[in-house]
Image (cartoon, rainbow, N blue to C red):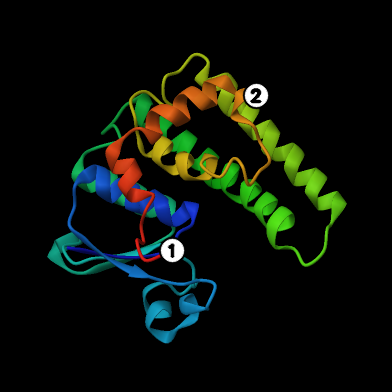
Amino acid sequence: MIDLYTWSTPNGRKVSILLEELGLEYRTHAINIGKGDQHTEAFVKINPNSKIPAIVDHEGPEGQPFNLFESGAILFYLAEKHGRFLPESGHLRYEVMQWLMFQMGGPGPMFGQVHHFLRAAPEPVPYAIERYSKETRRLYGVLDRHLSSNHHLAGDYSIADIATYPWVARFEWHKVDLVDFPNVKRWFDEIGGREPVQRGMKVPSAN
């Protein structure tokens, strides 16, 4: 059994998608980041960085409960533990890790900045909007060029795709039209058609 502490954000949905893809039994704990649930004493004991997602794997290493935070680390841990969505060895393993790190360092933070300055900033900041919008479109371009000759981000469907999909799913928040990036759209539509992805995108169901 795994306890998943999450909210309806791209980073949270990465983990719920993988849990659904793996068919694992898990309990969902909704951490409402708008109300500050991430700062409660109970949650900080699980994640001292006060961010979602986090998990507690009650059958962790040596059979002991194991707390883990940071979405990329959780994806790596679960994929490796269950032997799916991450090659065991060889160059494809490092290609998956490469594109996972690309998501963690590129689309994640950059798309997040676009979200903030277009939707949450108390007043418009034209410089920030232009800067992060341009970088967002550049990153979509990187994905589109790569996907023009690759069906998935790295070999077969992997945690790299799982990590990237929930961020692209907010393309309307980025003021991006996927028609401008046809290879991303093909990839996005295909992954979005997977039933585990659809279920994972609805977690937590209460929100």
User: Which secondary structure lies at badge 1?
Assistant: loop
Q: Is residue 129 left or right of residue 37?
A: right
- Residue 142 appears at what percent x and percent y? 61, 27
Which three-letter amino acid code belongs to the residue tagged 1?
Answer: Trp
- In the picture, the disc for residue 7 is 1
Residue furthest to the front:
206
- In the picture, the disc for residue 180 is 2
- In the picture, the disc for residue 79 is none
- Residue 199 appears at what percent x and percent y? 31, 48
Q: Earlier in the sequence, mark 2 or mark 1?
A: 1
Residue furthest to the right:
126
Q: Give whichever of 202, 69 is nearer the camera.
A: 202
Q: Residue at left 28%, top 44%?
A: 79
In the rendered image, the vertical position of residue 13 relative to residue 97, given as above or below: below
- Other residues around mark 2 within 10 Å, as few (<14) / some (14–19) / many (≥20): few
Q: Residue at left 21%, top 69%?
A: 65
Q: CA distance from mark 2 to mark 1?
A: 30 Å
Please say whether residue 185 is visible from this viewpoint.
Answer: yes
User: Which secondary structure lies at badge 2?
Assistant: helix
Q: Residue at left 36%, top 61%?
A: 204
In the rendered image, the vertical position of residue 133 relative to residue 147, given as above or below: below
- Residue 180 appears at what percent x and percent y? 65, 24
